[in-house]
């Protein structure tokens, strides 16, 4: 009889209904087994602190730490220390370059008195404006400024000489006082003026 009850108990225990009943008893309880002790081999890692690699300079303004300006280096002088190319004065004298080039070409090509004098007149009017603008300022001592003023006076005298020669030529002999109106003398004066114009153009370009 005891054997019969034991057999019935085993059958009920391993039947699907019995397994479902047993499973339902543990739902919601999580893992019911034994977990290993993980703290035995665990060692916490501490974050490593990093520092920026900076070489400290105690006396920054000392002569041992600051390199002197390379004033003897042409590249540094021409690029770093060169005067501002966009200054008003530089812009003003740049406008004279094409004027002088036209006067040079006029002499080179042997243009008549009227065309030559017209170009010289335009140059002189601009030179007068430049004189009024800078004569009382530091720019008035610049070589380029003085050169333009001298050239303006010279060009004006040659233009006046050519105009007078054209006017009085029929009535003057090329001797005595009339020698200044001699075509050869005027041509020599024009050649000299052309050289002065060329030198001034080069000077103005170098001032930029």
Image: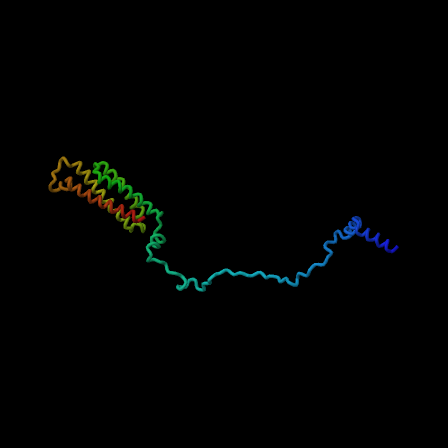
- Which quadrant of the rendered structure holds the N terminus? bottom right
Q: How is the image coloured?
A: rainbow
**Residue at x-position 73% and y-position 57%:** 33
Q: Is residue 22 left or right of residue 145?
A: right
Residue furthest out toward the top: 170
Q: Position of residue 6 (x, y in %)?
A: 84, 54
Q: Is residue 161 left or right of residue 90?
A: left
- Using the image, determine if residue 90 lies above or below residue 33: above
- Using the image, determine if residue 52 lies above or below residue 186: below
Count how many numbered circles sit on residues in the image.
Answer: 0
Q: Position of residue 47 (x, y in %)?
A: 58, 60
Q: Position of residue 86 (x, y in %)?
A: 36, 47
Residue 65, quarter of the rendered image? bottom left
In the image, 139 versus 93, the foreground residue is: 93
- Using the image, determine if residue 107 lies above or below residue 73: above
**Residue at x-position 84% and y-position 53%:** 7
In the image, 110 versus 153, the foreground residue is: 110
In the image, 151 versus 31, the foreground residue is: 31
Residue 3, quarter of the rendered image? bottom right
Q: Position of residue 4 (x, y in %)?
A: 86, 53
């Amino acid at each position: 009889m005891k054997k019969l009850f034991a057999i019935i108990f085993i059958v009920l225990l391993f039947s699907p209904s019995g397994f479902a009943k047993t499973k339902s008893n543990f739902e919601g309880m999580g893992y019911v087994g034994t977990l290993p002790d993980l703290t035995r081999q665990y060692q916490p890692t501490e974050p490593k602190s990093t520092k920026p690699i900076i070489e400290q300079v105690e006396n920054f303004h000392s002569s041992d730490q600051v390199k002197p300006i390379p004033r003897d280096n042409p590249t540094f002088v021409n690029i770093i220390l060169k005067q501002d190319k966009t200054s008003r004065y530089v812009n003003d004298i740049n406008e004279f370059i094409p004027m002088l080039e036209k006067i040079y070409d006029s002499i080179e090509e042997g243009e008549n008195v009227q065309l030559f004098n017209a170009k010289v007149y335009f140059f002189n009017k601009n030179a007068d404006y430049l004189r009024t603008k800078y004569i009382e300022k530091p720019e008035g001592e610049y070589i380029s400024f003085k050169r333009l003023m001298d050239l303006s006076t010279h060009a004006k005298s040659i233009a006046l000489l050519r105009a007078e020669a054209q006017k009085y030529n029929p009535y003057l002999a090329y001797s005595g006082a009339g020698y200044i109106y001699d075509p050869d003398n005027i041509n020599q004066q024009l050649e000299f003026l052309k050289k002065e114009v060329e030198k001034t153009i080069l000077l103005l370009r170098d001032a930029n």
